Amino acid sequence: MEQQATGEVRPSFQRITHLDTVRGVAVMGILIMNAVSFFFVGAAYFDISSPENKTILDWLVGGFGEVFADQKFMALFSILFGASVLLFCERAAAKGHSPVRLSLWRNFLLLLMGSFHASIWVGDILFVYACCAPVLLLCRKLPPNLLISVGTLLYLSPIIVSGLTVSFVDPAAFLKVWGGFSIKNPSSDVDLVFLGLMYDVFARAMGMMFIGMGLYANGMLIHVNASDAFFKRSLCLVALGALLSGVGLAWTATQNFSPIAIVQGNFANTVGTVPMALGYLGLLMWWNEKTSGVLINRIRALGKTALTNYIGQTVVCVTLASLLPGEWLSRTTVFLLIIVIWWAQLYLAEKWLKRYRFGPLEYLWRCATYRRMAAFVNKERT
């Protein structure tokens, strides 16, 4: 990642709008799976047969989430986080700061925000990202192809860990961990399943972060290929990922969604996530170059305020979950709530950025990172 000797300004020193588009869609997509955790108790996040689906539409919504959303949007978000580590270091160095020191401080602040978010909802991912950041900084100068290769292997490594765990533990231990009862019912089997789940989260996050660093370092996340051939390749990657994830879900269904079958069926989903996430990335970058209008502008605005909207989703959904009667909720009604939340966030993000330069949490994070106040209101609106 050396600066060119010609003095030419790299594209990364300007706002990269297609990354805002990808980030905006990633924040929206993450809600598809997070909402299951917000509104349903027990193993519903892992088992689409729980809670009992009332209609065929509930089954279709659950299957859609498993094939097209589960792992995929977290993978997209992780790719962007890995790329942002390199992007931030470049910009920090250009401003005369120590890139590593400033990045560590910035991610310590993220750790604090993640800890706060985790106190509201156990599924927080910001804490995990902040913990991964020092490793990314240590490895940031590795060759791009090596970063991508290591990232892919790291992402797939939970398959081995889960496979070994399945062969050693009582299947009931999975249900206890998935249902949140592991602390109340400790045992050696429960501990193994819990540790395996923690490894799964960290390995998949860091694996995609390494891939994101590699794609940024080799220029693929900076220079957009808007050709028809690139579109077709990206579409093929999405189709391949959907096929693999669909096969895993179908096999799990034939085994009546037993805990072991859910774990084993998820192997195909994990493998399928790699091509699907890269396919989503390519399609969104291509779409950003080919499209203009209200929708793409709102998605970019959502991407620019991703931190605020990610935590905002939690606040809204946790509040709704405490107010809405449980008998009203099904996978279909929850998906309808997701659509309403999407519309509200897209509308409000665009309106907010017409007046202000940053999202509320983005602004506080920026000021705390550089330890000075930054301009907040857009000058043309004053």
Image: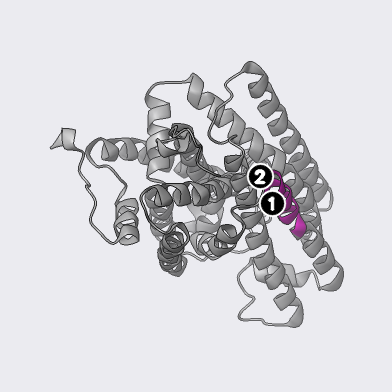
* Cα distance in 3D space between marks 2 and 1: 10 Å
In this view, the residue in front, 341 or 215, is 215
Q: Magenta span has 149?
A: yes
Q: In this image, 13 relative to 153: left or right?
A: left
Q: In this image, 56 relative to 168: left or right?
A: left
| Circle 1 Cα neighbour tier, 10 Å, few/some/many (<14 / 14–19 / ≥20) | many
Q: Magenta span has 153?
A: yes
Compared to residue 100, the image places residue 253 above or below, namely: above
Amino acid type indicated by mark 1: Gly
Q: Which residue is mark 2?
A: 144
Quadrant, the N terminus: top right
> In the rendered image, is residue 243 in sight?
yes
Front label number (2 vs 1): 2
Residue stretch rendered in magenta on the structure: 145-157
Within the image, what quadrant is residue 190 found in? Answer: bottom right
Q: Which residue is mark 1?
A: 151
Q: Name the element at disc 1.
A: helix
